[in-house]
Image (spheres, rainbow, N blue to C red):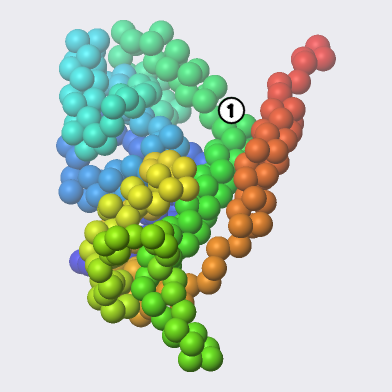
Amino acid sequence: MGRDYDFKKVIQWFAERADCIIVLFDAHKLDISDELRNVLNTLRPHQDKVKVLLNKADQVNSQQLMRVYGALMWQLGKVLNTPEVCRVYVGSFWDQPLVNTENAALLAREKEDLMNELSDLPRNAALRRINELVKRTRSVKVHAYIIHYLRKQMPYTFGKKGKLQSTYHHPPAVEHPPPFYPPQEKQQRLIGRLENEFVQCARRYNLPLGDFPNLDEFRTNLLQIKDISKFQKLDKSLVKEMDRVLANDIAKLLEKCSIQTAPMDDPY
């Protein structure tokens, strides 16, 4: 029976707003279904929030637990495809006595580590939000420069008063000037070689390529624009304001977050 909603978008919505995402595995059932695989792929941008729990670990002995743990790490490694191995908390997460007490000390330490991680969640969530603000601010700055750069690459256009105006600038003394293309053709050429345009934009304005948007998604959005030359001019005063926020205001937020989340002394 199918769903009457987009399951992937629902997962994305919750993942963006959650401070912690717990993925629970059963020690007797480690198979990753296609649906769970899609969920884990959707959670890939939020891996710092994901906590993997291996439940019912008290129902196997030490040798079996070692094999189960290794199998789970192998399965996760194929799906997550990350350079760092994710942390897996091993335990028996219910209110009943342990079935097998052979690993009782290990399970107790794992539970303590998990509880400590959860107790630090408010501070980590605040830092994550600040980091997300930094990421979004840098993305906005890069996006503004991309639009500015592409707009300047467009050829001659007619102004409001019918006068021929140029938005394409090249050195005045050029023995062999670049070929002239009609606006629509020039725009299609820019979109077609967008990867190279990203590199040129990054070099010209000293921007890190890691802050640039997804190439395919950006190209798809540009294809819906009729005339790039009609983009608004870049307001460099706003860019300076963003730089000021990143240089000064973010540092103040981090300092305030550290003060507010610092552990209080035990009065007893």
Camera-side residue of 185 and 16: 185
Q: Which residue position is annotated with label 1?
A: 120
Q: Residue at x 77, y 15 (%)?
A: 266
Residue 80 is situated, as x and y percent measured from the top left of the image, at: 26, 36
Give above or below for 138 relative to 92. Answer: below
Q: Check the image and name the residue furthest to the right.
A: 267
Q: Quadrant of residue 97?
A: top left
Residue 177 is situated, as x and y percent measured from the top left of the image, at: 30, 64
Q: Residue at x 41, y 81 (%)?
A: 157
Q: Residue at x 74, y 27 (%)?
A: 259
User: In terms of secondary structure, where does tag 1 sit?
Assistant: loop
Residue 4 is situated, as x and y percent measured from the top left of the image, at: 30, 71
Residue 241 is situated, as x and y percent measured from the top left of the image, at: 67, 51
- Quick one: label 1, few (<14), some, or many (20+) residues within 10 Å? few
Give above or below for 75 relative to 234. Answer: above
Is residue 124 visible from the viewing direction of this image?
yes
Q: Is residue 85 left or right of residue 246?
A: left
Disc 1 residue type?
A: Asp
